[in-house]
Image (cartoon, rainbow, N blue to C red):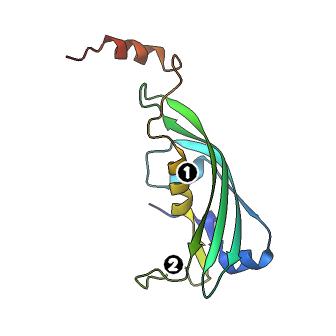
Amino acid sequence: MGSYDLHKLKLEALSMSGADATLTLDEAFFASLEQEEILGGLLAINLIVQKRAGNAYEINYAINGHVDVNCDRCLHPLSYPIDFEGSILVDAYDEDGYELLDREGSYDATWDIYEAILLELPLQRCHEEGQCDPEQELLLQSITVE
C-alpha cells in the first residue's frame, strides 16, 4: 500500500495544539493506494492527538461520509455510508524496534485510516432488492444451478 503525504500527522504539533484536525478524503486518496476494494468516495476525518507517556501518542478518529464499492451481485457501483469512531496508540517504535515516526516526528496514518474504512463495510455489498442493474438481473435469473 502506498503512502498519501497529506495524512502524515505531525504528532507533537497536533498534541500541543489541543485542537481537532480535519482531513478530507476524496477520489485522489483511494486512487493513490494500491487497492481495488474501494472505487472512491468522500469522507471527513476529525482527529485529536494526545501525548501519552514516553514517546507514545493516542490518536482518536471520527470518520464520516461515504465510499463507493462494486455491488457483489451486478458489479455496478454503489455507495455505502461510513460512520467510524476509534482510537489507536502510536509509539515511536514498535515491539521489534522498528521506527514508526519519521525524522520530523510524523506518523503516516494512511494505512490506519484505510483499514478503519474497510472494517465499516459489510462483508457482502449489494444493492437493495430491485436496485441492481436490470441487464445483470436478467442474466442472473437465467443461470440455473444443478
- Real-space Cα separation, disc 2 to disc 1, in angstroms: 21 Å
Q: Position of residue 121 (x, y in %)?
A: 52, 43
Seen from the viewer's position, the closer of residues 35 and 44 is 44
In the depicted structure, whether residue 69 falls above or below residue 108: above
Q: Which mark is residue 100?
A: 2
Residue 119 placement, left or right of 6: left
In the depicted structure, whether residue 73 falls above or below residue 16: above
Tell me the crowding category of disc 1: few under 14, some 14 to 19, or many 20 or more residues within 10 angstroms, Cα based.
many
The picture quadrant where one finds residue 50 is: bottom right
Residue 19 placement, left or right of 118: right
The number of numbered discs placed on residues in the rendered structure image is 2
For the C terminus, the image quarter is top left
Q: Secondary structure at mark 1?
A: helix
Amino acid type of the residue tagged 2 in the rendering: Leu
Q: Position of residue 70 (x, y in %)?
A: 47, 34
In the depicted structure, whether residue 125 falls above or below residue 74: below
- The residue pinned by badge 1 equals 117
Q: Position of residue 29 (x, y in %)?
A: 57, 53
Q: Position of residue 38 (x, y in %)?
A: 50, 44
